[in-house]
Image: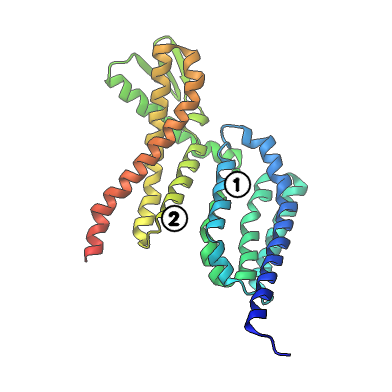
Amino acid sequence: MASTAGEVVPTARRAYLEFLALVGLGLALMYVPVILGLAQGLWKSDDQGHGPIILALTAWSFYRRKEQLAACFSPRGGSWQAWCLIGFACLIYVVGRSQHVTIFAVGSAMPLLAGLIWLAFGRDGLKLSWFPILFLFFLVPLPGAVVDALTQPMKMGVSWAVEGLLYQLGYPIARIGVMLHIGQYQLLVADACAGLHTLFTVEALGLLYLNLMGYTDRGRNFLMAVLIVPISFFANAVRVIVLVLVTYYFGDEAGQGFVHGFAGMVLFMVALLLTVSVDGILGRTLFKKKAAK
């Protein structure tokens, strides 16, 4: 008996749901232990505290694309490139889990998701999913040597900027390396105050903002992605200034207590405000002229 169109649609939907259930179960078995390990370890530190936010935003980004991905679903056995990508990801995962190399265990999720999506949704599905897949990069904990090498210049720069500004405003401040001396207090500009993790988090939120805005001009997207770096630097400087002034006027306990956490909120509010403002200025000047042409 020939199949009718009404029979074909439920069959395709059933195959789609079965694929999601199978893949979801497999990913849960592989990565839930990894996530639990991160939650009990690295994510408790200031350097990697942004991890849960990145994971939640990645899941939300995939959820936003669920209807478009469903329309692309067409399992035909997949291409050999997709299978190679999946095999490579599984190899990295096994090495990471067996040798306790977190960067491999977490990083394997990127090629694995890319391969699975390519397998079931084709190149169109891969194009739809490139952002959440690459967004997972911000979840990968980098080696300590890399973090130190990238963090030190930023800490030095923030310390220098804060000292110069407050000195010009008449405050009794001096600096030795990344140590700020103001009045009777000494403050260390640590990784948590001006480190790579804040740069990563601000960069991630900036890229998410650009993705949500949906700009098609690659030049505008690239320029904004680059400008997020100085925006993060400025926001970090504002945070350190807040902590220094609170410590100077209210004592060390105030600077290291609730205000320290609140200063982190100030950092992200300043970064978001600057990102939206800079984007608005670019849209009304440089890229408005391009559109007019």
Question: Looking at the image, which residue is at 52% across and 38% down?
Answer: 197
- Image height check: is 179 above or below 130? above
Kindly tell me whether residue 101 is visible in this rendering.
no
In 3D space, how far apart are the residues under numbered discs 2 and 1 (Cα atoms)?
20 Å
Residue 276 on image: x %, y %: 35, 45
Question: Looking at the image, which residue is at 47% across and 22% down?
Answer: 259
Residue at the disc numbered 1? 140
Which residue is outermost to the right? 98
Which residue is outermost to the top? 184
From the viewer's perspective, is 270 left or right of 19?
Answer: left
Residue 244 on image: x %, y %: 41, 20
From the viewer's perspective, is 33 left or right of 133?
Answer: right
Residues 54 and 192: in front is: 54
Residue at the disc numbered 2? 211
Mark 1: few, some, or many residues within 10 Å (few <14, many ≥20)? many
Quadrant hosting residue 185: top left
**Of the residues under marks 2 and 1, which one precedes in the sequence?**
1
The colour scheme of the drawn protein is: rainbow
Q: Secondary structure at mark 1?
A: loop
- Image height check: is 47 above or below 166? below
- Image height check: is 220 above or below 178? below
Question: Looking at the image, which residue is at 63% across and 33% down?
Answer: 44
Dot 2 amino acid type: Asn
Dot 1 amino acid type: Val
Residue 256 on image: x %, y %: 51, 19
